[in-house]
Amino acid sequence: MQYTSHNLLNSRGQDELIRMIQYAKTPDHEDYKNQLRIEALELNDKALNSSLEALTNAWSHGTLPKQKSQHEAYLRHWKQLILNLARCTGTNKWLGIAGDKNAYKDGQYMGLAYRATDSILKELVARGWVEKQQGAKYENAPRVNHYYPSYELKHHLAPFALMTASQSHTVKDLLAINEPDPQYEGFLWQPDHPDYMWLAEYNEFASDYNWVNKGPIRQTFKHTPFQSGRVITAFQNIPNRNFKIRTNTLINGDPIVEVDCNANHLRLYLAMHKRDVIGEDAYQPIVEASGVERQHVKAFINIALNSKSCDAAKKAAVKHYSVPFHDSDKIMDAFASIYPGLPLLGDFSLTAMQLEGMIMKGIMQQAMKDKVFVLPIHDAVACQLTSVSWAREALMENWLRVLKQHYKGASLTIK
């Protein structure tokens, strides 16, 4: 069955999407990586609008308020919840929605009113179409409840799963500070700030291109406007590890290729500590010295680099990647023998994300100049097949430009 537009997803991608719907496990709703926040969405494939209208009318039947003047608003709420749950279907994530009235400032929350949103969500739960997990209350922050579509609902939503788009490009949408320090509560960049201007320019450039989960390319900081600065987009949420969906999508109807760095975080860490990388594949010497499979070495190294303690790293590696404790110990010993005197536990995440943001900014600014479109994927870029050579050169050039400022011996291998 053809579920999605032929110019955004190839047949392998469609098969992988359906396979994910059938076999993917329900993710841990408490892990922020498994959560999407509700946002104003529309369809990226206009041909599907009539199907969405029909589905909205059918599902909302019997739920609309008695006053006909309110019907249009309720139908709009139904449609937004359907589209957001569809995006969750295409990413296998939970939908986070504020659960208390205080979040609906001036009667609105992401363009939605509390009464209609609450009424429809209760209806979806009562029908067994979504699972609800009550969110915790946080000081000075609204409670966010989590909703996950049922197996049956996912199949109904599959035609829209990767066809949702968000078109908002305001300063507040493009730049954000996560967990801001007290002095930066409510901080907002000005429209003439360089951080905003280049992002706005790139999003305008990107408007001529079409891709799955289309939406603004943003930059997020941590605690202050000067830390982290990772470039993100909804495209990154599309699965590609256990279900090869993202690499089977298209940009303007053309196949995409992801151009990636070998052992990026490890290379960043070594460069910042002025150490040379051992081996062309930075993981392979650790694999050989530890006797642990490469997949587990990669997983544990990246967790450990961002952990404050060995115990925390080992527990996270078991939980997320099934790396046994004894394998983690072997990897730690191997790393110590290959890079003597260099601690593996670095709590390095904010620094790594800041470096990645600087690298990605350079690539995207170069892309605009050369009229080449790329989508950021953390430390990699997705581009049209015809732009692969350009993307490899741009990634290498910008990576080396940023890291050689810290260590002249910094080196990179492109996958």
Image (tube, rainbow, N blue to C red):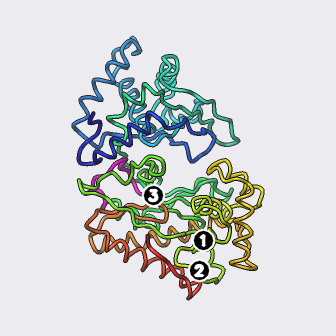
Whether the residues at callouts 1 and 2 have beta carbons within 8 Å, the answer is yes
Bounds of the magenta segment: 204-218
State the SS at label 3.
strand
The kind of residue tagged 2 is Val
Nearest to N terminus: mark 3 or mark 1: 3
Q: Label 3 vs label 1: CA separation?
A: 25 Å
Residue 264 appears in which quarter of the rendering? bottom right
Q: CA distance from mark 2 to mark 3?
A: 31 Å
Q: Left or right of 411: which side holds 135? A: right
Report how far apart the C-alphas of labels 1 and 2 lie in the structure.
9 Å
Q: Secondary structure at mark 2?
A: loop
**Where's residue 380, x and y in %?**
44, 65
Q: Please say whether residue 111 is visible from this viewpoint.
A: no
Tell me residue 96's x, y (percent): 54, 37
Q: Give the number of marks.
A: 3
What is the quadrant of the C terminus in the image?
A: bottom left
The earlier-in-sequence mark between 2 and 3 is 3
The percent coordinates of residue 78 (x first, y second) are: 39, 26
Q: Residue furthest bottom?
A: 408
Asked whether, in this view, residue 369 is left or right of residue 403, the answer is: left
Which residue does the numbered mark 3 point to in the structure image? Answer: 218
Residue 277, numbered label: 2
Report if the CB atoms under discs 3 and 1 are less than 8 Å apart. Answer: no
The residue that label 1 is drawn on is 266
Q: What kind of element bears circle 1?
A: helix
Name the residue type under label 3.
Arg
Is residue 211 inside the magenta stretch?
Answer: yes
In reply to whether residue 295 is colored magenta, the answer given is no
Q: Quadrant of residue 11?
A: top left
| Residue 296 visible (yes or no) | yes
Which of 2/170 is in front? 2
Q: Nearer the viewer, mark 2 or mark 3?
A: 2
